[in-house]
Image (cartoon, rainbow, N blue to C red):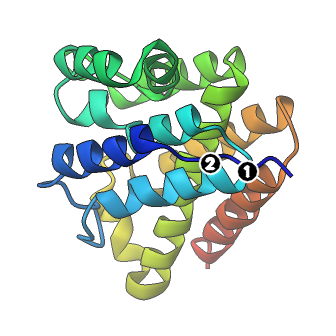
């Protein structure tokens, strides 16, 4: 078993992420955003990830959601090139204006096909937690959740199914299987 010892660097990243995302909440549930970041970091650690991968998990949305390139530079200075490289691999855009949805998703999928195992791990943990949250929201609120997504149910599910195909091409682990199960349940439930 690969046991990772978390250091002060992880604790620092946890505080940094909490402050950075302090005003942000999850789209449907309104839960403080740090809950997502903690869940992604937990999944990374449970899958045997390193401290740097766990830090990148905590900060995977920092560039995209909290300041773009200046935040990237601050993260690089605080946590190093390896962490920033992982975050870069999980970032859909970093400079306004935000590109169109389909363009962002297709670029993300293409980059994911050729990425490092570290980026794959953090990306997969992120998408798995998002899908689990989406399923929980759907179970509580029904089809009204899809109005929160600018591209609706079909395109959202297309993106998850496309992600699963890419993750399966680069490995077959418990998180990929869990993502497939959750997305399958979302797809079935929403056809009813």
Q: Name the residue under label 1.
A: 47
Note whether 7 is above or below 96 in the view shown. Answer: below
* Place of residue 169 in the rendered image (x, y in percent of width and height, measured from the top left): 84, 30
Binning the other alpha carbons within 10 Å of mark 2 as few (below 14), some (14 to 19) or many (20 upward) gives many
Give me the residue at 43% from left, 58% from top.
Answer: 38
Seen from the viewer's position, the closer of residues 180 and 192 is: 180
Inspect this view and state whether residue 44 appears: yes
Q: Name the residue under label 2.
A: 44
Marks 2 and 1 in Cβ contact (< 8 Å): yes
Seen from the viewer's position, the closer of residues 19 and 114 is: 19
Q: Is 191 displayed left or right of 67 in the figure?
A: right
Q: In which quarter of the image is the C terminus?
A: bottom right
* Place of residue 144 in the rendered image (x, y in percent of width and height, measured from the top left): 34, 74
Secondary structure of the residue carrying numbered label 2: helix
Q: Which residue lies furthest to the left in this view?
A: 23
* Place of residue 59 in the rendered image (x, y in percent of width and height, measured from the top left): 37, 38
Give me the residue at 40% from left, 53% from top.
Answer: 37
Inspect this view and state whether residue 96 appears: no
Q: Is 103 displayed left or right of 177 in the figure?
A: left
Give me the residue at 43% from left, 81% from top.
Answer: 142
Note whether 26 is above or below 15 in the view shown. Answer: below
Seen from the viewer's position, the closer of residues 63 and 162 is: 63
Q: Quadrant of residue 162?
A: top right
> Could you say which disc has been placed on residue 144 in the image?
none
């Amino acid at each position: 078993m690969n046991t990772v010892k978390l250091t002060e660097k992880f604790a620092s990243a946890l505080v940094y992420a909490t402050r950075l995302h302090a005003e942000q909440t999850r789209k449907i549930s309104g839960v403080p955003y740090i809950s997502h970041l903690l869940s992604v970091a937990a999944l990374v650690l449970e899958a045997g990830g390193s401290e740097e991968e766990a830090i990148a998990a905590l900060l995977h949305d920092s560039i995209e959601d909290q300041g773009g390139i200046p935040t990237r530079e601050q993260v690089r200075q605080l946590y190093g090139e390896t962490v920033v490289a992982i975050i870069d691999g999980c970032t859909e855009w970093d400079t306004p204006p935000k590109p169109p949805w389909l363009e962002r998703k297709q670029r993300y999928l293409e980059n994911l096909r050729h990425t490092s195992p570290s980026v794959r791990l953090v990306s997969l943990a992120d998408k798995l937690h998002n899908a689990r949250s989406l399923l929980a929201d759907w179970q509580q609120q029904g089809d009204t959740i899809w109005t929160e997504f600018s591209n609706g149910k079909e395109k959202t599910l297309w993106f998850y199914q496309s992600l699963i195909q890419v993750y399966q091409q680069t490995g077959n682990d418990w998180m990929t299987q869990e993502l497939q199960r959750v997305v399958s349940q979302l797809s079935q439930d929403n056809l009813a």
